[in-house]
Image (spheres, grey):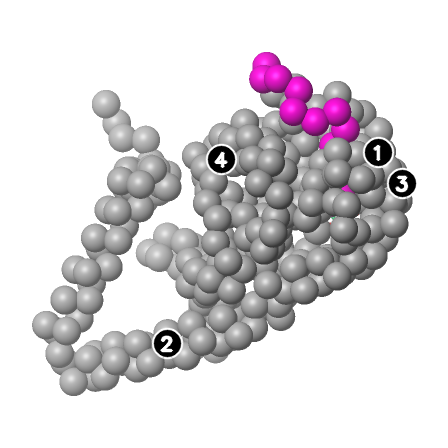
Amino acid sequence: MSEILFDRIALIGIGLIGSSIARDIQKLGLAREVVISTRSAETLKRAEELELGTAYTTSAADAVKDADLIIVSVPVGASEAVARQIAPHLKAGAIVTDVGSTKASVIAQMAPHMPENVHFIPGHPLAGTEKSGPDAGFSGLFKGRWCIFTPLPGTDRVALDRLSIFWKALGSMIDEMDPQHHDKVLAIVSHLPHIIAYNIVGTADDLEAVTESEVIKYSASGFRDFTRLAASDPTMWRDVCLHNKDAILEMLARFSEDLAYLQRAIRWGEGDKLFELFSRTRTIRRSIVQAGQDVDMPDFGRHTLDK
Ligand code: NAP
């Protein structure tokens, strides 16, 4: 048990991310009350069955009344609608944050609606899985993962510290950057890999010379590693693409140029160029393991070695 950090927390959106936060709050005892809000009665019922909070409502406006911390965990394209609904009901001094995967767009959507007497601190925990909904969440999702804040100019440091303490209690490491930089970094480390995965799985699905059963049967040769990313939530990823358009298009242009280089090296049999690139990329994997962002096991730890 940790100490109580907020009297009342309102969670707007209770899917993978919202419900993982809810589970950690409960497990660690970080709040006296946790009000859960989601737009559909069905998801709300499931959250109640899972006992994720202390009160439940489909009205985001009702949920935020008297809340000290409000965490918005909905697809980024829904940010403005949520901001409009909650703004008139926020308590003076409350902290409003979000977990959206794009930051400049969320700020543009939410900031204009936020009253002056609340602290709006955009955030993004870099943790997740390909699953969605309240059943997909789990306690410990954020442990050892980064949470990036993109504070607006003039943000109150005390409020920012309180929010940092909350995320640290969940096991996160904290970083701060400006929203445009966040969107560029995330375009390469997260958005592009997902787009490439969606594309390669789509291409395989469209192939006529190779049957679908062969794609599935022989998938362990590499293909299946892309299918995890390509199984991610379509609504979330549609919104990410639409709301980080510029940075994603910039990275895609770079990617296409580099792919053309690789294509040419293969065509002209330039083995040294291929070898040099494949050696360089191998060291990146080692650095990720060293940074504690993945396990040092073959095939992502899928096999337990025989002793
Ligand atoms: P999720 O599991 O699909 O849950 C989405 C939640 O948002 C549900 O409560 C859903 O409500 C609600 N919602 C969906 N559309 C809405 C709309 N138009 N208006 C209001 N509420 C709506 O999603 P998630 O994976 O938790 O993602 C939530 C946010 O976290 C997204 O902004 C995403 O970019 C960000 N994020 C995701 C990951 C990840 O790996 N999944 C990682 C980091 C950040 P109903 O079910 O009641 O419709």
Q: Secondary structure at mark 1?
A: loop
Q: Please report the bounds of the magenta region as a residue range.
A: 1-14
- How far across and how far down the image is residue 227, in percent? 48, 56
Q: Secondary structure at mark 4?
A: loop
The residue where tag 1 is placed is: 66
Distance of mark 3 from mark 1, alpha carbons?
9 Å
Please tell me whether residue 16 is drawn above or below residue 238 in the rendered image. above
Question: Toward the viewer: 91 or 36?
Answer: 91
Distance of mark 3 from mark 4, alpha carbons?
29 Å
Tell me the number on the disc at residue 172: 4
Residue at image x 45%, y 76%? 250
Q: Secondary structure at mark 2?
A: helix
The residue where tag 3 is placed is: 62
- How far across and how far down the image is residue 239, in percent? 64, 64
Residue at image x 59%, y 63%? 104
Q: Is residue 38 left or right of residue 304?
A: right
Question: Toward the viewer: 108 or 47?
Answer: 108
